[in-house]
Amino acid sequence: MTKGADRTTIVNEAGVRAEAVAPVIVSASRSTDIPAFYADWFFDRLEKGYSAWINPFCGTRSYVSYDKTRFIVFWSKNPLPLIPYLCRLKDKGIGCYIQYTLNDYEAEGLERGVPALGSRIDTFKRLVDVLGKGAVVWRFDPLVLTDSMGPYQLMEKLNGIARRLEGYTEKLVFSYADITQYRKVRYNLERNDIKYREWTEAEMLEMAQLIAVANSSDWKLNLATCGERINLEKFGIEHNQCVDDALIARLCYDDKILMDYLGMNVCRVEHTLFDGNAIPVGAIDIGNGMYALRTQNNHDKGQREFCGCVRSKDIGAYNTCPHLCEYCYANSSPKSALANWSRYKANPGSESII
């Protein structure tokens, strides 16, 4: 059960009535790359009104209804397959934005399954042309240290992408790779003889300063970290909300059902030289003199300790992403991910990804 979501009843494909959670906001997905590999499946399930979800910790099968869904946050390293489907969301009155992880580890071979960097940058621009600049968020995630790649080499990669995205993004979200915390990540890197290094706090601060300086002089982006304990506010770097009620309000402030769910009061503030009208403290600027004010705390307490996301229902599944990135925490092994991908291809119309 997702806190803050209603329950409803669906009739599954076997003709059996079943209880389902009915989220207003869907996350698709932290656990796998739905846009890259499962877009056909997802939009088929959206049309059918529900999908099945397998709890990764206990294996319990449950159902997710899309009857009340008003917004979807997509996560992807190759969201190109989404483009033909975006008009369907618009027709259904469902908003979206994309957390687009756009790294450059081509020389290091850390992301062998993703398309070439130039192709991914072109996809980023195409999505912005369709959805708007704020609706495609650039992530360089995670920042990985190896014996031949330190903060300065990473900065070269960041600068290269930032230059090519100029005018197409307003934000950069990053994180520091935390490898020893995930045994399967450490195993995969060591198995492939990748000489990784853990970040020290001094290196994190050095990297943050390099990013802040480049941003101040050239990029002019909003900067944020994802799920990081370290406080980088002195560099102008915030803790991010990847499922972000402020961005949702900016994109869909005219959706009253969604704004009521998020506890957002949308208002206009008129300015003159003399009336003293002030923007309320904590107001979210949504443009054209419009602001949204939170009246409730939407934080998702079910996420990691330093995660800032608001409540949503993630519909993905671990061990299903064929990108096979070497540092991936969502696959226990390439073998299991490829086996599940093969199962999906054999039965792409199933209720669940696997």
Image (cartoon, grey):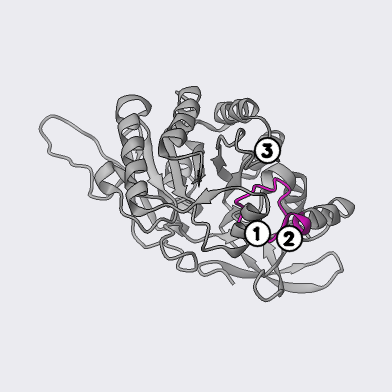
Q: Label 2 vs label 3: CA separation?
A: 27 Å
Query: Which tag is nearer the camera, tag 2 or tag 3?
Result: 3
Q: Which mark is residue 51?
A: 2
Q: Residue at coordinates 49% horizontally, 39% vertically from top-left?
A: 149
Please provide percent x and percent y for residue 110: 62, 42
Q: Are marks 2 and 3 in contact (CB under 8 Å)?
A: no
Q: Amino acid at mark 1?
A: Ile
Answer with mark 2 or mark 3, whichever residue precedes in sequence.
2
Q: Is residue 175 at all visible to an observer of this figure?
A: yes
- Mark 2 is on which residue type? Ser
Q: Most extreme residue toward the left, as rendered?
A: 274
Verify CB contact (< 8 Å) between mark 1 and mark 3. no
Q: Is residue 251 left or right of residue 292?
A: right
- Assign a secondary structure to mark 3: loop
Looking at the image, is mark 1 or mark 3 earlier in the sequence? 3
Q: Report the magenta stretch's main SS.
A: loop
Q: Quadrant of the N terminus?
A: bottom right
Residue matched to label 3? 114
Question: Over which residues does the magenta segment extend?
Answer: 319-337
Q: Nearer the viewer, residue 149 or 46?
A: 149
149 to 128, vertically: above or below? below
Q: Closer to the observer: label 2 or label 1?
A: 1
Q: Is residue 75 above or below residue 84?
A: below
